[in-house]
Image (cartoon, rainbow, N blue to C red):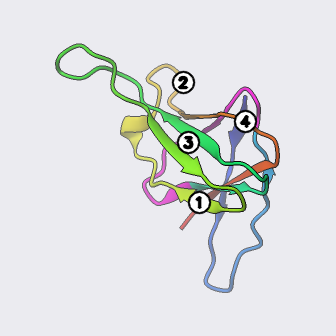
Amino acid sequence: MAQLAFQQAAIAGSNIVFTAADAAGDTVLPNIEGGVLVRNTDAVAKTVTVVVPGNTRFGQPDPDVAITVAAGETRLIGPLPQELADPEDRLVHLTYSNVTALTVAAISI
């Protein structure tokens, strides 16, 4: 599992560097002005899951958020508020259905 560092957007433009998605998942600091760009260059869709910690007021686990990234698509997932952070490590956790041809970049606006 790798922790993604935010890359800052700039008025003059930013050169976004993508890294391979980690098969064990990735983490990122919560950021209400940031998100994760997910680029799928494979021929099949992938699912990115934002793991949501905690329970509902009825004691049931809060549902995770699953995002489908179609073949050839780049999706921005965010913002990533503090409520999505795991209380133990204070990071937002992402998992992937498959990491073949899947790259990610954390972006802060």
Mark 1 or mark 4: whose residue is earlier in sequence: 1
Query: Can residue 71 be found in the magenta stretch?
Result: no
The one of 4 and 67 positioned closer to us in this rendering: 67
Residue 84 in the image: state x and y as whole percent.
Answer: 42, 36
| Amino acid at dot 1 | Arg
- How far apart are the alpha carbons under marks 4 and 2? 24 Å
Q: Which residue in the structure is indicated by mark 4?
A: 98
| Amino acid at dot 3 | Leu
The one of 77 and 16 positioned closer to us in this rendering: 77
Mark 3 or mark 2: whose residue is earlier in sequence: 3
Mark 3, secondary structure of its residue: loop
Mark 1 or mark 2: whose residue is earlier in sequence: 1
Mark 4, secondary structure of its residue: loop
Can you say whether 96 is above or below 33 in the image? above
Residue bounds of the magenta highlight: 22-35
Mark 4 or mark 2: whose residue is earlier in sequence: 2
- How far apart are the alpha carbons under marks 1 and 2? 26 Å
The circle drawn on residue 89 is 2
The circle drawn on residue 29 is 3
| Amino acid at dot 2 | Asp
